[in-house]
Image: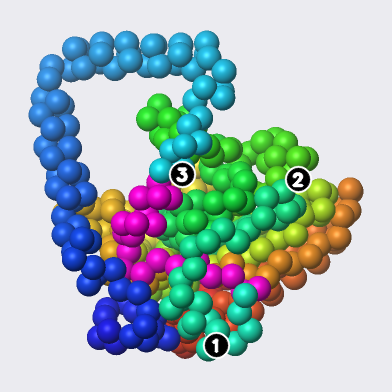
Amino acid sequence: MMDLRNSAAGRTGTWGNNDVRPELKDSSQPGAACAAAMVHLRRVAETPVPRYVQLYLSFIAVYEGYHYATRPSCHQWPWMRRLMRHVFTHYPYFRLNATVFEEQMDSAAAACKAVEKNDATSFVPPNDHALFAFHPHGVLSCGWSFGGIHHMSFEQADCRWLVAESLFYFPIMRELVNWMDFSSASKAAFRKILRTGQNACLMPGGFEEATLYERGKHRVYIKQRFGFIKLALQYGYKVHPVYTFGEEYAYHIFPYLLKFRLKLNEFKMPGVLFFGRPECFYLPRTDVDLITVVGKPLILPRIDHPTKEDIREHHEQYMATLQELFDRYKGVYAVDPEATLEIY
């Protein structure tokens, strides 16, 4: 057990290890499917360009017409998220995937026990005026997906999962985010959700935090992210900092030209070149302990018209709370117990 690569510092023999489950040992199917899809796409690309363009434009015309003529509720399939939770609960992707809540732990021993138990029962109550801020974004947000959206502990939370508005601009991606019942992270959509008192989950770091990703590094982009704190103050929400250990080992990336790649983010362009599994580059590596820690809430006052000073004060409180959460659990959950959190 202790010889596992990229394992959490506090890992013991009682922690789960999906690599030894016989029904999960052969994980080549996703990679094989990906490779077959790439070969198929290459063959399709050899079709004469005019015909391809005609088919594409015809598809777009029908697709956009459908979205224009139907109600938004017709595009959402809530059962899809329930199905995904069921699949990843019984057929976990990572070697270890756990979500733990700081409110249930009072010591390092309790932190170890929480992962050993790996309780997947629902814990987050609905309509709790709670805002869950997930860090780090990572390349493709493994902690957000496997420790939040698809984890059973959020099953009864009735959360709205906020994603970049740009994802709704692309035909196939739009369907995926609609099927999963996601919402746009635009200010207007965000306000509409908070008015209802419904729980909300977001990744404040956005594109920039994804660009900052470097294998083995713990980095968050939060110093210039004031908007979610302002809205939390205006609508009386408490804010839970959420940090995923193991996210930093899910991918290999091109780590150079950081300033240039961050500049691309200003134009809403992703700035990360990544590589996951050898047989399918965009799938994350499975040989990691992915542990998502949901911190205790930062209780904020309700201020209908917060000043810049109010926002800055509580934003600094949030950053301090996030730092404390990381420092408290890195000795148990991080691969490197002496790791430092780099805040940008």
Contact check, label 2 and label 1, Cβ < 8 Å: no
Q: CA distance from mark 2 to mark 1?
A: 34 Å
Residue 197: which numbered mark, if any? Answer: 2
The residue pinned by badge 1 equals: 108
Q: Earlier in the sequence, mark 2 or mark 3?
A: 3
Would you say residue 102 sits in the magenta stretch? yes
Identify the element where label 2 is drawn: loop
Q: Quadrant of the N terminus?
A: bottom left
Q: CA distance from mark 2 to mark 3?
A: 22 Å
- Which quarter of the picture shows residue 229? bottom right
Would you say residue 160 sits in the magenta stretch? no
Magenta-tinted stretch:
84-103
**Pair 1/3: label in front:** 3
Residue located at (41% from left, 43% from top): 83
Up/down of 341 relative to 267, above or below: below
**Pair 2/3: label in front:** 3
Q: Can residue 317 be seen here?
A: yes
- Which quarter of the picture shows residue 25? bottom left
